[in-house]
Each structure stands twice: as structure tokens, then as C-alpha cells.
Image: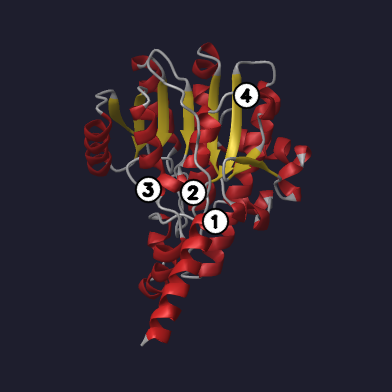
């Protein structure tokens, strides 16, 4: 029995060391207060987005929960207002799978809100089907929706500078492809149950997030707006809710043992939104609250510029 207890104790100690040394990740150390500032967080009714919105609310910001699901978002707003003691937390409807909805959100926001200091492009999907405008869901929501939203709000961000845009990407951007004819095709929707096709489409969209941030920084150089892309870590969220039941059951034990919780996953986003002195690093990629190198395709300025031009055409900005 003593040998078994020693084995269990050893395994527990090993887990604690690995979890806190490797998986738990760094914490945002900024003590910045945000009274009088306004932030938008997309996909903030749950997961990383909700944790990010809560932290910003605790710092005194007016926080806009930009979400598709009204009931979940209003419930999240109540939770955040209660926990933070900040009543300036409000829901505004935004469906990133619809250009019409993105434009409506931006129009309403600009009419009703006098300032915007922080834009957190947090929402993300990995799933089947296509957007209202006919694009693959991952590309349409994760990239095109946020691309359009950011551009429609840029003037407000510039007027309130210094301001920041943080776009949540992922380490999986390294496996992404910038196949523009495929991405732009309205037939590029994941219609099968293939996990691989789901993952590849997600990787492609995350590469787009990195390239978008790089080109945005180039275009905003000399203004008061800076931007960053982040890998939040491996986090237990609802992102994989489109997976089959058996896949979720297989993933669950690993998630419980080793994945970050949403609060842990929000730390790098908060670091890039709040940490003083990051302005010279605009356009760069962060993970674990530190500057990281992106994959080779993510450093290609020509690719970033081409993606921007294609995205302008697809979202009808030009």
C-alpha cells in the first residue's frame, strides 16, 4: 500500500510541476486602470472573451459585449457587472458570419458610443458550413468578419489614440495556408464531418489573423493605433463544440488536466491590450505574455498585403 501511495504522490507532484511550469502560463502584470475608456470584446459571452471582458470591467472600462447569442450575452453581462461592480457592461448584437450584421453593429456603435480605446477580436469558430455571405465558416468569421469590423471602427480608434487592436490567433497558424482562390471561393465550406478539413480551415483562418495584424500595423504606422496578434494557449473553451461526441469525450480528460482555464487563456490578450511600452512591437505576435516568432508565412509582407487587398474586395470595402 505504501508503494502505491508513493506512486500516486509522485504522479501528483509531477503533474503539479508540469502544469504550473509548462501549461499554466504567464500572467498579465499590468496594473493599468481604464476609467473613462471603452473596449469592445467579440465573442465575450463565454470562454476567453468573457474572462477578458471581466478583467477590463474590473479595471473600470466601459465594455461592449459584441456577441451573436442575445440570451447568453445578456446573462454574461449580468455576471460581469455583478462580479466587477461595474455597471458599464452592455451587450450589442454582432454576428461575424454576416457582413450585414457587422455593418449594422458598427453603425450602431458609432452613433451611440463616443469613443473606442480597445478592440479585442476574440471570437472564433471551428465548424461546418458557410457564412451568410457564402464563405467557409472559419475564414468568414475568424478573418473576414473581424477584418470588416476593424476597418469600420478604425477612424474611431484613431480619434481616441493611443488605442489598441488585439486579434486572437493560435499557434496552429503555422500549419495554415494562404490559398487565395480557395479561401475566396464560396464553395470553400466544410460540408463533411472530416475533422481534418475542420482543423485545416481553422489553421488557415489563424494564419490570416497573423497576416492581417501585420499589414494593419504597416498601414497604421505613425498613427496612435497599434495592433497585436496572440496565441492564448491551449484553453478549455467551447471552440470544439462542433466536434462529435466521442471526440469531445476523448479530449475532455486532457483538457481537465492540462488545458488553461478561460482566465488563464485571457492573459496574453490582456497583456497586449494593457501593457505599457509595447507600441514599437505593433504588428507582432505574442504568446505566454511574451513576444514570439511567427511561422515563415506569417512574416511575409507581400502575402499580408495581398490578403488585405483580397479581403477588401470580398467584404466590399473597395
- Mark 3 → mark 4, Cα distance in angstroms: 28 Å
Q: Looking at the rendering, which quadrant does residue 252 occupy?
A: bottom left
Q: How is the image coloured?
A: secondary structure
Q: Nearer the viewer, mark 1 or mark 3?
A: 1
User: In this view of the protein, which residue sits in the foreground, 52 or 128?
Assistant: 52
User: In this view of the protein, which residue sits in the foreground, 111 or 176?
Assistant: 176
- Mark 1 → mark 2, Cα distance in angstroms: 44 Å
Where is mark 1, residue-wise?
A: 21
Q: Is residue 68 above or below residue 20?
A: above
Q: Nearer the viewer, mark 3 or mark 4?
A: 4
Query: Left or right: 204 with respect to 300?
Result: left
Residue at the outermost front position: 2
Q: Nearer the viewer, mark 3 or mark 2?
A: 3
Q: Earlier in the sequence, mark 1 or mark 3?
A: 1
Where is mark 4, residue-wise?
A: 277
Q: Earlier in the sequence, mark 3 or mark 2?
A: 3
Q: Nearer the viewer, mark 2 or mark 4?
A: 4
Structural crowding at the residue carrying mark 4, measured as other residues with C-alpha within 10 Å and reported as few (<14), some (14–19) or many (≥20): few
User: In this view of the protein, which residue sits in the foreground, 59 or 107?
Assistant: 59
Residue 9: x %, y % from top left: 42, 73
Q: Earlier in the sequence, mark 1 or mark 2?
A: 1
Where is mark 3, residue-wise?
A: 47
Q: Looking at the rendering, which quadrant does residue 113 occupy?
A: top left
> Residue 205 shows which numbered tag?
none
Judging from the image, what secondary structure is the residue with disc 2 in? loop
Residue 301: x %, y % from top left: 76, 37
Judging from the image, what secondary structure is the residue with disc 3 in? helix
- Mark 1 → mark 4, Cα distance in angstroms: 26 Å
Query: Left or right: 259 with respect to 21?
Result: left
Contact (Cβ within 8 Å) of mark 1 with mark 3: no
Where is mark 2, residue-wise?
A: 134
Amino acid at each position: 500500500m505504501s508503494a502505491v501511495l508513493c506512486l500516486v504522490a509522485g504522479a501528483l507532484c509531477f503533474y503539479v510541476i508540469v502544469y504550473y511550469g509548462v501549461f499554466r502560463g504567464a500572467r498579465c502584470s499590468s496594473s493599468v486602470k481604464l476609467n473613462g475608456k471603452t473596449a469592445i470584446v467579440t465573442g465575450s459571452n463565454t470562454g476567453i472573451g468573457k474572462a477578458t471582458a471581466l478583467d477590463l470591467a474590473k479595471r473600470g472600462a466601459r465594455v461592449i459585449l459584441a456577441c451573436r447569442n442575445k440570451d447568453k450575452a445578456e446573462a454574461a453581462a449580468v455576471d460581469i457587472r455583478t462580479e466587477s461592480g461595474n455597471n458599464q457592461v452592455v451587450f450589442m448584437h454582432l454576428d461575424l458570419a454576416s457582413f450585414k450584421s457587422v455593418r449594422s453593429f458598427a453603425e450602431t456603435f458609432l452613433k451611440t458610443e463616443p469613443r473606442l480605446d480597445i478592440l479585442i477580436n476574440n471570437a472564433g469558430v471551428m465548424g461546418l458550413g458557410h457564412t451568410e455571405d457564402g464563405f467557409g465558416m472559419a475564414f468568414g468569421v475568424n478573418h473576414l468578419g473581424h477584418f470588416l469590423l476593424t476597418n469600420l471602427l478604425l477612424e474611431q480608434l484613431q480619434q481616441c489614440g493611443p488605442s489598441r487592436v488585439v486579434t486572437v490567433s493560435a499557434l496552429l497558424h503555422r500549419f495554415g495556408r494562404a490559398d487565395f482562390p480557395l479561401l475566396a471561393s464560396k464553395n470553400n465550406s466544410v460540408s463533411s464531418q472530416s475533422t481534418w478539413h475542420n482543423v485545416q480551415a481553422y489553421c488557415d483562418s489563424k494564419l490570416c489573423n497573423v497576416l492581417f495584424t501585420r499589414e494593419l500595423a504597416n498601414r497604421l504606422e505613425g498613427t496612435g493605433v497599434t495592433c497585436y496578434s496572440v496565441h492564448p494557449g491551449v484553453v478549455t473553451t467551447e471552440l470544439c463544440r462542433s466536434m462529435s461526441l466521442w471526440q469531445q469525450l476523448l479530449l475532455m480528460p486532457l483538457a481537465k488536466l492540462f488545458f488553461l482555464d478561460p482566465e488563464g487563456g485571457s492573459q496574453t490578450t490582456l497583456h497586449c491590450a494593457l501593457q505599457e511600452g509595447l507600441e514599437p512591437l505593433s504588428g507582432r505576435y505574442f504568446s505566454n505574455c511574451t513576444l514570439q516568432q511567427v511561422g515563415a508565412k506569417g512574416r511575409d509582407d507581400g502575402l499580408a498585403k495581398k490578403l488585405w487587398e483580397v479581403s477588401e474586395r470580398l467584404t466590399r470595402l473597395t
